[in-house]
Image (spheres, helix red, strand yellow):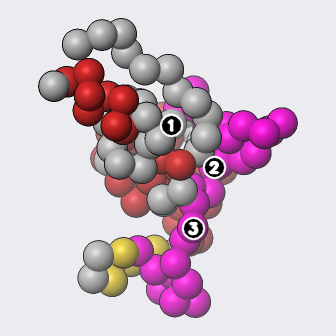
């Protein structure tokens, strides 16, 4: 099967709003850590599901990326990496078609 792929820090997996996939365990952790900064950002986005996508209940706009994603010297980074949601912690490079390494991982599995 080969070695695990290393993240390219391209940000493609973060150009969806992964905070929508945050679980109760994430919210409990953020409350225990007194991370009102994170909770406030999520709460004020007012995102709702509309068919197969999230939209802002306030503006109708579609979020284009995770609100905690930022560019740094040509790479994309997470501003809450140490306490990022479980969905992000469990994500493996190449495990979805969003990742440019998807075909590499797919070939390794064959």
74, 60: nearer the viewer: 74
79, 65: nearer the viewer: 65
Mark 1 touches mark 2? (CB < 8 Å): yes
Q: Quadrant of the C terminus?
A: top left
Q: Which numbered circle lies on residue 64?
A: 3
The residue lying at 50 percent from left, 20 percent from top is 6
Element type where label 3 sits in the image: loop
Label 1 to label 2, Cα distance in Å? 9 Å
- Is-magenta flag for residue 63? yes
Chain part drawn in magenta = 54-83
Q: Give coordinates of residue 80: x percent, y percent.
A: 61, 37
Q: Residue lying at the far left in this picture: please name it.
A: 110
Label 2 to label 3, Cα distance in Å? 12 Å
Residue at mark 2? 68
The residue lying at 67 percent from left, 37 percent from top is 77
Q: Locate residue 62 relative to residue 103 in the image: left or right.
A: right
48, 91: nearer the viewer: 91
Q: Nearer the viewer, mark 2 or mark 3?
A: 3
Residue at mark 1? 84
Report the number of numbered marks. 3
């Amino acid at each position: 099967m080969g070695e695990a792929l290393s993240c390219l820090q391209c940000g493609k997996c973060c150009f969806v709003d992964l905070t929508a996939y945050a679980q109760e365990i994430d919210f409990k952790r953020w409350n225990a850590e007194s991370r009102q900064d994170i909770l406030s950002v999520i709460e004020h986005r007012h995102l709702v599901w509309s068919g197969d996508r999230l939209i802002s209940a306030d503006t109708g706009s579609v979020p284009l990326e995770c609100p905690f994603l930022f560019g740094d010297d040509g790479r994309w980074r997470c501003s809450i990496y140490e306490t990022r949601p479980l969905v992000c912690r469990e994500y493996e490079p190449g495990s979805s078609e969003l990742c440019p390494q998807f075909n590499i991982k797919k070939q390794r599995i064959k």
